[in-house]
Image (cartoon, rainbow, N blue to C red):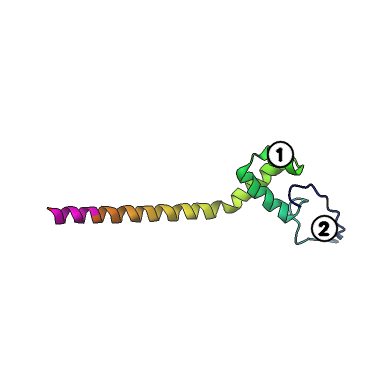
């Protein structure tokens, strides 16, 4: 049901801690723990935000633009360490290729003289 706004009504158990009197809801595996949306919608917002503006994503699914921005920022925080590692690995590879090129070039110069 892509690009169709759908509401889901969920009956879930509400609990109250007898020690601290805090109330909380039963965890649902397909629901985001921080927001009242499905994990599938979170994933879609993350991917769509890479290609579209936050405002257009928000309008398409019927949520506030700030919600889209916050979901995207959480996504960036989640993948940032992996991206930095990939970037560093790429730089190391480029440095290695450059050094090999310099060594080969200098060897070619020596043999041609």
Q: In the image, what residue occupies the spot 12% across and 53% down?
A: 113
Residue 89's disc is none
Q: Nearer the viewer, residue 60 or 74?
A: 60
Q: Nearer the viewer, residue 71 or 48?
A: 48
Which residue bears the numbered disc 2? Answer: 25
- Position of residue 13 measured from the top left corner of the image (x, y, whole percent): 86, 60
The residues tagged by marks 2 and 1 sit, at their Cα atoms, a distance apart of 26 Å
Start-end of magenta stretch:
105-112
Query: SS of the residue at dot 2?
Result: strand
Q: Residues within 10 Å of mark 2 (few under 14, many from 20)?
A: few
Q: Residues within 10 Å of mark 1 (few under 14, many from 20)?
A: some
| First in residue order: circle 2 vs circle 1 | 2
Q: In the image, what residue occupies the spot 76% across and 42% down?
A: 63
Residue 65's disc is 1
Task: Give the residue at the far top of this rendering.
Answer: 55
Q: Would residue 92 be found to the left or right of residue 12 on screen? A: left
Q: In the image, what residue occupies the spot 39% across and 55% down?
A: 92
Q: Would residue 88 be found to the left or right of residue 60 on screen? A: left
Q: Is disc 2 in contact with disc 1, using a CB cutoff of under 8 Å?
A: no
Q: Residue 89 sits in which quadrant?
A: bottom left
- Position of residue 23 measured from the top left corner of the image (x, y, whole percent): 84, 56
Closest to the camera, between mark 2 and mark 1, is 1
Q: Nearer the viewer, residue 80 or 90?
A: 90
Q: Nearer the viewer, residue 103 or 25?
A: 103
Most common SS among magenta residues: helix
Up-down relation of residue 66 to residue 47 (above or below): above
Q: In the image, what residue occupies the spot 58% across and 53% down?
A: 79
């Amino acid at each position: 049901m892509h690009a169709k706004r759908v509401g889901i009504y969920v009956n879930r158990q509400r609990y109250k801690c007898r020690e601290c009197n805090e109330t909380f809801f039963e965890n649902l595996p397909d629901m985001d723990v921080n927001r009242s949306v499905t994990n599938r919608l979170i994933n879609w917002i993350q991917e769509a935000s890479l290609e579209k503006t936050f405002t257009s994503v928000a309008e398409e699914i019927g949520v506030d633009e700030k919600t889209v921005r916050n979901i995207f920022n959480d996504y960036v925080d989640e993948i940032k360490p992996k991206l930095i590692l990939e970037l560093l690995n790429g730089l190391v590879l480029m440095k290695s290729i450059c050094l090999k090129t310099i060594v080969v070039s200098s060897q070619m110069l020596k043999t041609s003289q």
